[in-house]
Amino acid sequence: MLGQLFSDIGAIWARYGTVYLSGIGNTLLLATVATLIGCLIGFVCGILQTIPCAPGDPLLKRVLLTLLRGLIRAYVEVFRGTPMILQAVFIYYGLPYFFGVTFKDIWTVSILVVSINTGAYMAESVRGGIMSIDPGQFEGAKAIGMNHFQTMLYIILPQTLRNIMPQIGNNYIINVKDTSVMFIIGFQDFFAVHKMVSGAVFKYFPSAFLEMGGYLFLTLLASFLLRKLEKKLQGSANYELVNTDQLVMTAGNYQYPGAAPYEEKSRDYQGEKP
Amino acid sequence: MSDTILEVRHLSKTFGTHAVLKDVDFTVRKGDVTSVIGASGSGKSTLLRCINLLETLTTGEILFHGESVTGGKINQSAYRARVGMVFQNFNLFSNLSVLENCVIGQVKVNKAPRKEARDRALHYLNKVGMLPYINARPAQISGGQKQRVAIARALAMEPEVLLFDEPTSALDPEMVGEVLDVMKGLAAEKMTMLVVTHEMSFARDVSTHVVYMADGVILEEGPPSQVLVRPRDPRTREFLKRFLG
Ligand SMILES: Nc1ncnc2c1ncn2[C@@H]1O[C@H](COP(=O)(O)OP(=O)(O)OP(=O)(O)O)[C@@H](O)[C@H]1O
Ligand SMILES: [Mg+2]
């Protein structure tokens, strides 16, 4: 039995190996690009959703912000709440219907669909990630005069990114698998190759077996690489003490008059009652 | 000595129906080291947070060099950059190294060139004795060290006033001294400071001015020799008795 299976797989691979490989390539490229764009959408939504809105702000600003938040909310609910396979059909046929644009390139529409779908999930992950950051981080940034965008860009989102890496990984792995629904609009991914090959040689199971193994290999690899990336984002566990003399030299153009009296540690304040 | 930097006028702050600050008036002059003392819940932190616009005032206004910063005319971020703040819980940026913590505000807010910002950061980190740790991240240093970095971060912006909200209250007793030493040094250099503190020896020996708050109002203010030694108000006396014994 098994011998038969492997010889069938061998035969299919010998004839269609390069087609399967190009399917894998397309799947990976689509999933990777769409996940990256999806993350970007998620982070932009995160920044926009958290623009502070005080009761004292001008009416126009408050109306615009409310509108913006409503729009993002609607976007998330619609694209999280409908199947991606339908979204693909909807956009592929809908855009020409309404705007007269036809897609010459199946890549453009595929990336568009998967990115928008991923973005809806990422927007929620990012929102959750931002909420979990210590409010002191926002206040520290505010207190040195950073505005909302600076605070988000340099302080909050880098920490959010680190915290939501597991969710980004989740989305990436889901995308590796679920881009398979894009065959509906003719995208030639790994799964589409299965449909084509098994239709041509009438060997459904061997090809399905190959696909299962292929997808599992891809997701395991992705999972492994994501862990490495996560580790890297955590930063090193150690730091090096810096040789003070060298640094004082580089900082030497700031000579302040008078020795600072507190540099020899005065202990006057140690005897304080708690 | 008498140029006014900050004026708080008729400041009131309510959270819901809870009046936390009631018609507070006071002034910070250049070179003043003002200690704000008072019981827990009397509104000291809220006062500081209102001054730095971390809270919106319910009524009243704050003048910075005679100009209102609450009327919406002055850029609030620019104002905050001129008024440094040191928090009880440090609030160092946990994604950045000690050095970057002191550089980022200068580069992004003050638009200083990176090289210059780095030199200035190193200067102030040296001042607080944290030069060896510039590559560490906040999670890797002790509480006292974090607070010293937080002070260096605020100083690196070269603010005109530094606000401190109980800078030593979250510290283990053996780390309190190192932070107070730094603050004492700043006072000796005539840095203008407004310090909410429970450290009575700091209020007595270092500050030039003491403000006693109770239930959202300033009950008494003046030089430490008066407020701390010969308080006029019986409630101030009661409070001090508990602290000084
Ligand atoms: N965001 C808030 N919402 C509601 N009430 C608040 C808020 N912040 C502070 N308060 C209330 O305001 C009062 C004064 O608080 P504040 O933190 O200013 O006191 P404090 O003098 O700094 O006390 P402590 O010495 O304990 O730090 C408290 O009763 C507190 O419950
Ligand atoms: Mg307080």
Image (spheres, rainbow, N blue to C red):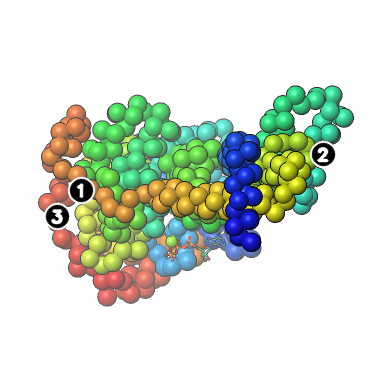
Residue closest to the eye, A122 or A232 = A232
User: Is A115 placed above or below B91 here?
Assistant: above
Q: Are marks 2 and 1 in contact (CB under 8 Å)?
A: no
Residue bearing the label numbered 1:
A241
Residue closest to the eye, B59 or A232 = A232
> For the point 19% across and 44% down, which residue is it?
A242
The image position of residue B73, as x and y in percent, is 57, 32
Give, as a three-letter code, the residue at label 1. Leu
Badge count: 3
Front: mark 2 or 3? 2
Cβ of mark 2 under 8 Å from ligand 1: the answer is no
Residue bearing the label numbered 2:
A90
Q: Which mark is residue A265?
A: 3
Q: Is residue B101 left or right of residue A190?
A: left
- Among the two numbered marks 1 and 3 on one chain, the one whose residue lies closer to the N terminus: 1
Cβ of mark 1 under 8 Å from ligand 2: the answer is no
Give, as a three-letter code, the residue at label 3. Lys
Label 3: element kind: loop
Q: Which chain's residue wears label 1?
A: A
User: Is B38 placed above or below A124 here?
Assistant: below
Label 1: element kind: loop
Residue B55 at least partly seen: no
Give, as a three-letter code, the residue at label 2. Phe
Front: mark 1 or 3? 1
